[in-house]
Amino acid sequence: MPKGKRWHPAEESDELVFAVCDRFLDQLRKQFDPQTDNEHGEKRGAAAAIAEWLREEWGREDLTRERIYPLFWEAARRDFLFLQPPREQHLAERIADRYGVGRYFQDEKTIQVVNARGSEAFRHVTSVAADLVFSLIMELGKKKGRVHVGMGGGFSTMMVAKRLARRVHSELACPDLVLHALSAGGFLIDAPQKAPVTYFSYFEGALTKVEYVALYSETVVPSEDYERVKRNPGVQMAFERAAEIDIVITSFASVEDEHGMLRQYLEHLIKAGQLEADLVEKMKKAGWIGDVQFRPYRAEGPMLEECPVRAMTLFELSDLVEMARTEDKHVVLLAGPCGECGRLKTDALEPLLTQPKLRLWSQLVTDVETASELLR
């Protein structure tokens, strides 16, 4: 480095930053305490050992041990690091046994319980789900030239899309992708980042070829206008291509969670005077317990008549049930706590496990607290 020039880790090459990060983690694997003796009997830390290696192998006298840590954080900033949360296999097996999941799905990836709890559980559930979707993409890529992925709206799927995009960016062998927006948009004007079409930008610049299928229409329409809106040219094309989708990524909401997007939007319409004031309570009395892709359901199955409005979304609950049972099709359901308040959603999750009309998932990812609550 020229004298007088201020050093910054962002100026270093990917090759060097990755090499330092890889070496640093290897040092920590070899010695639980970085201050243990090395092979020469000297007392020194991992950073000092890496600095010496850089001098010997790279001829970089300027990269002192003080500069190793900034390079490690630079590796994190460049998304070279992917922590994999631990799984709780015993709980997953107990849930499968208790709810008879094995009778429907035989894959070892059917249920994944993330061994995380508290405020961070939501984030780790989305990380595991993203890695699961990525593995499914790679498996399907061996059978077909392009893999079609449908993404629903909401905070959970947004987090999955972010990590999935990073995995796609770093994998040279990733097959070509076609990303589909499952719903027309975000339900709230102050939360546009929850609209699936906004996730497409995360994949820009990927080495693999990525195509997009958006769904542009009104976000919600009166139930009697739904079929008419579906026939609009732009909307119709998106619906016609829904059959191409191989993997659906979706979450669900409990009616008791004030952050559920369908409930929020219904309350928005109520405040605007467009729906009757007691609609939510009427739907709850009729059995509304939760919704998937903005389609409400009761414990016995889908609610088809009680909601006067319908979100524009590609799949009905019955479609997802059929898709989950179809070979080489996957519906990945995120079943972690609410990403905004941390509330567990086991009340709305249990019917998705017990009711065949609602068994709309082929892979389920949840957290250890939700799993424990299901088994009580």
Image: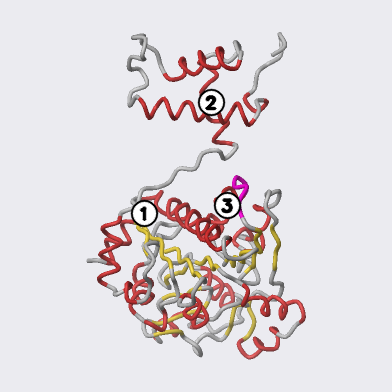
Amino acid type of the residue that numbered disc 2 sits on in the rendered structure? Val
Secondary structure state at the residue bearing disc 3: helix
Where in the figure is residue 300, as x and y percent of width and height?
A: 37, 85
Left/right placement of residue 157 relative to residue 367 reads: right
Q: Is residue 339 left or right of residue 105?
A: right
Look at the numbered discs 3 and 2 and tell me whether their residues touch, using CB distance below 8 Å.
no
Q: Which residue type does callout 3 highlight?
A: Lys
Q: Which mark lies nearer to you, 2 or 1? A: 2
Q: In this figure, which residue is indicated by the disc labeled 2?
A: 20
The type of residue carrying mark 1 is Val
Residue at the location (45% across, 66% down)? 333
Q: Which mark is residue 114?
A: 1
Q: Which residue is drawn at the image coordinates 62% and 72% (left, top)?
A: 183
Residue 272: x and y in percent read: 61, 76
Q: Nearer the viewer, mark 3 or mark 2?
A: 2
Mark 3 — residue? 162
The label shown at residue 190 is: none
Q: CA distance from mark 2 to mark 1?
A: 30 Å
Vertical relation: 88 (above or below) 272: above
- Mark 3 nearby-residue class (10 Å; few <14, some 14–19, many ≥20): some
> Where does residue 369 sit, x and y in percent of width and height?
31, 57
**Which of disc 3 and disc 1 is earlier in sequence?**
1
Residue 232 point in image, percent of width and height:
75, 83
Examine the rendered structure and indicate whether residue 70 appears above or below residue 271. Answer: above
